[in-house]
Amino acid sequence: MFQDIRYGLRMLLKKPGFTIVVVLTLALGIGANVAVFSIVKGVLLNPLPYPDPEQLVTIHQSKPNFDAGAIPYPNFLDMQRQNQTLQSMAISRGAGFTLIGAGEAERVTARMVSADFFNVYAIKPAFGRNFTAEDDRKGADPVAIISAKLWARKFNSDPSLVEKSITLDDRSYRVIGVLPASYKASVTEVYVPIGAWNSPALQDRSAALGIHGIGRLKPGVTLEQAEADLDRVMAALAEAYPASNKGNGAKLISLKEGLVRDVQPVLLMLFAAVGLVLLIACVNVSNLMLARSTGRTREFAIRAALGAGRWRLLRQSLIESTMLALAGGAGGLFIAAWGTTAALKALPTALPRQEEVTLDLRVLLFTIGISLLTGIVSGVAPAFKTSQWRFNDTLKEGGRGVGSTRARAQGVFVVAEMAMALVLLISAGLLIRSLNALWNINPGFNPDNVVTFGVTFPPSMRSAKAEGSRAYMRDLSRRLNEMPGVKGASLVAGATPFVSEDDRYFWIEGDPKPTSTSEMHMALFYVVEPGYLPAMGLQLKKGRFFTDQDDERAARVAVVDEMLAQQRFGAGEAIGRRVFIEEDQPPYEIVGVVGHVKQWGLDNDERNLQAQLYVPLRALSDQYVEGTGGAGVVVGIDHEIGPSVFTSIRSVVQQQNNQNVISNAQTMNEVIADSLAQRRFAMIVLGAFAAAALLLASLGIYGVISYLVGQRTHEIGVRVALGASRRDILTLVLGHGLRMTLLGVALGLIAAFGLTRLMRTLLYGVGATDPATFAIIAVLLTVIALVACYLPARRATKVDPLVALRNE
């Protein structure tokens, strides 16, 4: 074995050009596989980084309109006390604070959590302690736990920060703990107890407030058993509090499934696709090795004559192919490291659990294993062909007479390459057409040249009376609307398309008053100003939109979308009808109807909740306006957005008050692009694989035709000597390539017709067997293959018959 390895190494070094081409080809195929495996391993295969992660579940309250809705805080407390299947249960709600006093004021992401939140995950702070029940109650001293990233970035990892205070908004919070650096599963930087939140809505059983639960199952308890147990609790709550809980239930989802279920089909498709790329690479290498074996015919014949058995010859060929594959695997590791990093940086929002995508020992073992497998797969055909030659005939004929069988094998490989490349190209083409179809969808507003961001008001506004809050917001809105080039600007609350959601119950005046929320209608709730319509480019279908006069002193008015108008008023006129949104409050009169907006995303707007309801921000009651800490903002520009626009907006916001803090500034086109990140990731990666497959297949058919031209030099010389024209020779060679190509395309179309159906869920606006895509890709591949065949065919037309016959 050592002798064969040493000899194989000498032979590979003797032909450096061949060796480099093969190693690079295999490095491309192996590197792509390793990159995708590292992503699949990190996202799908790795267990969650917590003790007994299979016990972790997310907990939601199901409603007639939602399978996984939010949980009102009082309902959570009852679920926590009365369930019999959970070891522990906690809740969390997204929030945000302005961190003051640690350098420049900065908006930080935060979560309000119940006391057992980190205990459910079995996470202990690196410094300090977890929350306790004493911290998680109304009137408790404000305390916070911060992430290791924030601790390092703003406080220089100072251990003495624990038990010291930091200022969040206008309130002092004592830091009681710093999370370990290993806890990277969340982008949240600050955690505070939700029970200490001084909001009347927290105690309202009909106000869910975006609260969702997390729980740990007791040993031996299944997800179904726990869901049935919480359904029992919800049934008791429905009986005790029918007005807010009638018809509600519980929904539990495995924590890991909830994290990866959207991206799992994409990754599995890419894993299958990258396997095809590796197969094409192996076929290409097999072709190269078959061609290379032409020059070694006499060598193997002499070795056989000197006593080498067929197994020894077979082993020699397999050793050389395996050495090439291992070298390709080493190169593939570098390609995988670069490719994985580049993919994650290019589309940072496309994948969950990105922090766990690493090249670790398992990836190394996978690389070694797939390299060995590649060496065997790519070398087995050449090895068997070599070991089965008739060596006596070879020695008599001086090495000729084996070309035809080798050419047939190479032809079969080319057909297989073409078929596999076509499958990948069609799959990529379908994804490209899907994404193009999505981009051409009308979202219900004009996202071009619209900026959205959040603004946090100075701490002093937290204690402002309603009149002062209204004046401050009006002043900011006026400043933004007066900016040069602004066609409309609006402060917003509640829902924002693609960004945030808020839903409210309502009922129509004249209908029987509902006795419970389950008997009410539900709509997405948008709180906006008059500038929202021109800023977002909403279509006004009937009536009017809000004006500056629709304030707290005017009669209450609302605008509905065409979906709500159709659902609730049918062919009747919605304008003039009145709806109740808040119990014991005057109704809102509908004064306008606007076009429907795709709130949930271009590709995901089929949820049950479609109705949309708009109310004026300036007409909100004192209860909602008093002490407002910030708002969302949308600004429509009448020209293309550049960096100067963001600078101008920031300048105007801070001219009002230099303590205003802007966060999450994006264009609406960027927001929409982020919503399609997973589709773009799949399209880009699969497109890259398809391009690699096309390149390898083109090189494969080029190599085979070149080899055949070399083998048929004598025949071509005879044909030319007997009067064959240049066109005859060109037709002869191209015809051979065209037959292989068409056979490969035919087989590829059959395979694609079946396989693309598996990616139906990833497509939008195009069928899995779209005839146009199939036809265009088939023609494209055929043309590219003919171009690859033309170069050796053109060389064949220049064969000098005298030279060819003399050489023979």
Image (spheres, rainbow, N blue to C red):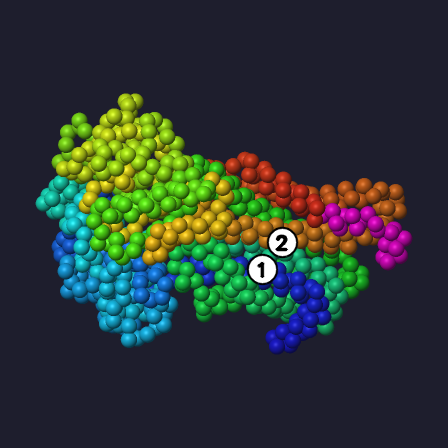
- In the rendered structure, which disc, 2 or 1, sits on the residue that comes first in sequence? 1
Q: Which residue is mark 2?
A: 696
- Which residue is found at the position 66% from the left and 65% from the top? 20
Q: CA distance from mark 2 to mark 1?
A: 10 Å
- Which residue is found at the position 84% from the left and 46% from the top? 719
Tell me: 453 left or right of 437.
left
Relative to residue 505, is residue 51 depicted above or below?
Answer: below
Tell me: 381 left or right of 796.
left
Residue 117: percent from the left, percent from the top?
Answer: 24, 61
Residue 231: percent from the left, percent from the top?
Answer: 18, 48
Identify the image quadrant of residue 239. Answer: top left
Tell me: 677 left or right of 599.
right
The magenta span reads 789-808
Relative to residue 423, is residue 173 depicted above or below?
Answer: below
Q: Is residue 199 visible?
A: yes
Q: Residue furthest top?
A: 572
- Asked whether residue 792 is drawn in magenta, I would say yes
Query: Circle 2 sits in a helix, a strand or a loop, which is it?
Result: helix
Q: Amino acid at mark 2?
A: Leu
Tell me: 142 left or right of 327.
left
Q: Amino acid at mark 1?
A: Leu
Quarter of the rendering occupied by the N terminus: bottom right
Query: Circle 1 sits in a helix, a strand or a loop, which is it?
Result: helix
- Which residue is found at the position 19% from the left and 33% from the top? 587
Q: Which mark is residue 28?
A: 1
Front-most of residues 254 and 179: 179
Residue 764: percent from the left, percent from the top?
Answer: 45, 40
- Which residue is found at the position 27% from the left and 40% from the top? 618
Q: Residue furthest bottom?
A: 2
Q: Are marks 2 and 1 in contact (CB under 8 Å)?
A: yes
